[in-house]
Structure formats: C-alpha cells, structure tokens
Amino acid sequence: MPAADGLVGVLNLTDMDKRTYKGVSRADMEKVRGELGKFGISLPPGDDVEVKGPLGVKMQVTYSEAAKTLELEITKKPVFVSDNQIWKVVEMGAGKFVNGRNE
C-alpha cells in the first residue's frame, strides 16, 4: 500500500532533535529539575533518565557532572507537536540556568 508507506515516512521518529549544554553545574541541574516541575515535567532521580512530558512527549536527559554537560534529546513526540514547541517549554523552565551554553 503506497499510502501506508508514505505515512510511515511522515511519522518516522528516528531523527529527533538533541541539544547539549556546557558549563552546567550540579546546582544548576537541581534548579532545572525544580523549574521544569512548575511545567508539569518531572525529572526522575539520576543523571541519565527518561522524562515523560505532556502529550506523550518523551526526552532522554543525560547529565555529566565531571564534564559539566547536560544533553537533552527528544525521543518521542506526537506529529502535531513540533520540536520547537518542545524546546520552548524546556527553555522556559530551564533557560535561565542553561541559556547561552547550547552547542
């Protein structure tokens, strides 16, 4: 079925957006956890965690204290939510602690 093949291509989630922030301290990371909580996004304990947000959005969050880097990767999202919409919410919550540190 050609239509189904085309639909699968449109819904392909393998090319998700990823951002890395440098110079993020442990204290910054804890502040990010608190701020994102205000938006209904809970970061589980640990430095390499999957985060579930509203509307079925999932992200992988990896923090390295030694390298002072925070990596955020969108791993799942509905087709009607753009990457930009997700990053806008993330930066509203975490932006004051990581803005200007994005690679």
Image: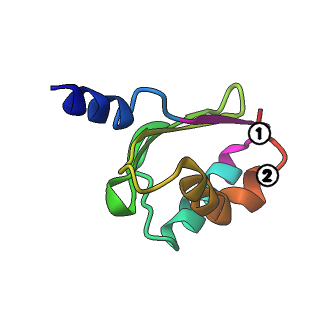
| Residue at 34%, 61% in the rendered image | 55
Q: Which residues are magenta?
A: 17-27
Residue 53: image quadrant is bottom left
Near-viewer residue (46 or 36): 36
Residue 13: image quadrant is top left
Please name the residue that numbered disc 2 is placed on: 99
Residue 48 in percent (x, y) is at 46, 34
Residue 15 in percent (x, y) is at 48, 28
Instruction: Name the residue type under label 1.
Output: Asn
Question: What's the mark number on residue 43?
Answer: none
Please name the residue that numbered disc 1 is placed on: 102
| Residue at 22%, 26% in the rendered image | 2
| Residue at 35%, 51% in the rendered image | 78
Badge 2 marks a residue whose secondary structure is: loop
> The N terminus is located in which quarter?
top left
User: Outermost residue toward the left?
Assistant: 1
Near-viewer residue (47 or 70): 70
Cβ–Cβ under 8 Å for marks 1 and 2: yes
User: Outermost residue toward the front?
Assistant: 2
